[in-house]
Image (cartoon, rainbow, N blue to C red):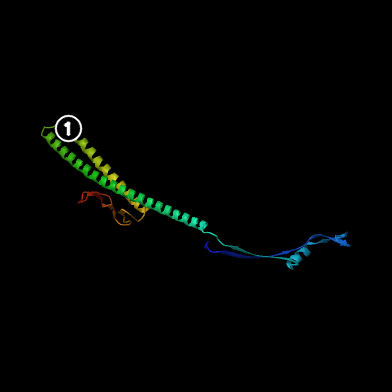
């Protein structure tokens, strides 16, 4: 309803009453002398109400005209402030979602590089073990150095496995944020339901169970 326009309201009420109880019988002038009493039963009272023996009509009209728009202007200003606050909260939520997606994408890139580094370390450990084993076969090394090379290879393999697990966890976290967050946000683009997820230039491809190194140097799951 427009509160700036005048407000005109018309009211009409009807009421029907009945008289019951004990009716006094008087004689003479006012107030008279009571000479007896007659009880009035409920059926008589109900008949008076139904037949409207004692009707009451109430009619009225109420006109309200605003002398100023201060109340309406205040309500409008309050509504605009609430709208601005809602937009600010929405923008803050979107920025938080984009920041979380970028952080998750950065974790994916970092763990992919860890896979490359740990894979290179494992390859070097294999080469060292092979070299020590050959030196031991010709009597130029000791069993201690061979065991040490085997220990280093086991540690390097564990590091590679740990990096791969962290990478998978980062991919799962990224996809979870995509499902929970908005489909499109400023500063990053997401493609939910596709096998390629892109945020700020970072690319992740997920398939089944083995880790390989892409041509760009990013570890992918196939």
Instruction: Name the spot of residue 198 as percent of width and height, x first.
Output: 28, 54
Which of the 4 image quadrants contains residue 191? bottom left
> What residue lies at 59% left-to-right and 65% top-to-bottom?
8
Vertically, is 186 above or below 150? below
Vertically, is 166 above or below 198? above
Q: Could you tell me how many numbered marks the image carries?
A: 1
Instruction: Name the spot of residue 58 as percent of width and height, x first.
Output: 68, 64
Q: Is residue 204 left or right of residue 97?
A: left
Which of the 4 image quadrants contains residue 59? bottom right
> What residue lies at 24% left-to-right and 37% top-to-bottom?
155
Q: Is residue 149 left or right of residue 62?
A: left
Q: Is 192 or 161 nearer to us in this picture?
A: 192
Instruction: Name the spot of residue 2 as percent of width and height, x first.
Output: 52, 63
Q: Is 107 or 37 nearer to us in this picture?
A: 37
Label 1: few (<14), some or many (≥20) within 10 Å? some
Tell me the SS state at disc 1.
Answer: helix
* In the image, farthest residue toward the bottom: 51
* In the image, farthest residue toward the front: 67
Residue under label 1:
145
Q: Is 63 or 112 nearer to us in this picture?
A: 63
Instruction: Name the spot of residue 64 as percent of width and height, x first.
Output: 58, 62
Vertically, is 171 above or below 139? below
> What residue lies at 17% left-to-right and 32% top-to-bottom?
145
Q: Is 78 or 201 nearer to us in this picture?
A: 78
> What residue lies at 35% left-to-right and 50% top-to-bottom?
95
Q: Is residue 13 left or right of residue 27?
A: left
């Amino acid at each position: 309803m427009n509160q700036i326009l005048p407000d005109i309201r018309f009211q009409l009420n009807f009421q029907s009453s009945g008289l019951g109880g004990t009716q006094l019988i008087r004689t003479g002038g006012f107030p008279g002398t009571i000479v007896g009493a007659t009880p009035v039963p409920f059926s008589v009272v109900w008949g008076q109400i139904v037949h409207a023996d004692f009707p009451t009509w109430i009619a009225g009209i109420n006109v309200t005209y605003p002398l100023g728009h201060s109340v309406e202007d205040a309500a409008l200003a309050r509504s605009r402030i609430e709208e601005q606050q809602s937009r600010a909260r929405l923008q803050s939520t979107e920025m938080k979602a984009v920041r979380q997606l970028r952080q998750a994408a950065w974790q994916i890139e970092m763990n992919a590089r860890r896979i490359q580094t740990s894979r290179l370390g494992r390859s070097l450990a294999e080469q060292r073990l092979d070299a020590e084993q050959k030196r031991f076969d010709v009597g130029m090394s000791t069993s201690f150095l061979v065991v040490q090379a085997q220990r280093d290879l086991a540690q390097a393999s564990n590091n590679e496995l740990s990096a791969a697990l962290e990478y998978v966890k980062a991919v799962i976290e990224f996809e979870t944020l995509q499902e929970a967050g908005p489909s499109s946000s400023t500063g990053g683009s997401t493609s939910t339901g596709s096998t390629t997820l892109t945020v700020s230039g970072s690319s992740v491809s997920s398939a089944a169970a083995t880790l390989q190194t892409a041509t760009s140097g990013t570890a992918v799951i196939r």
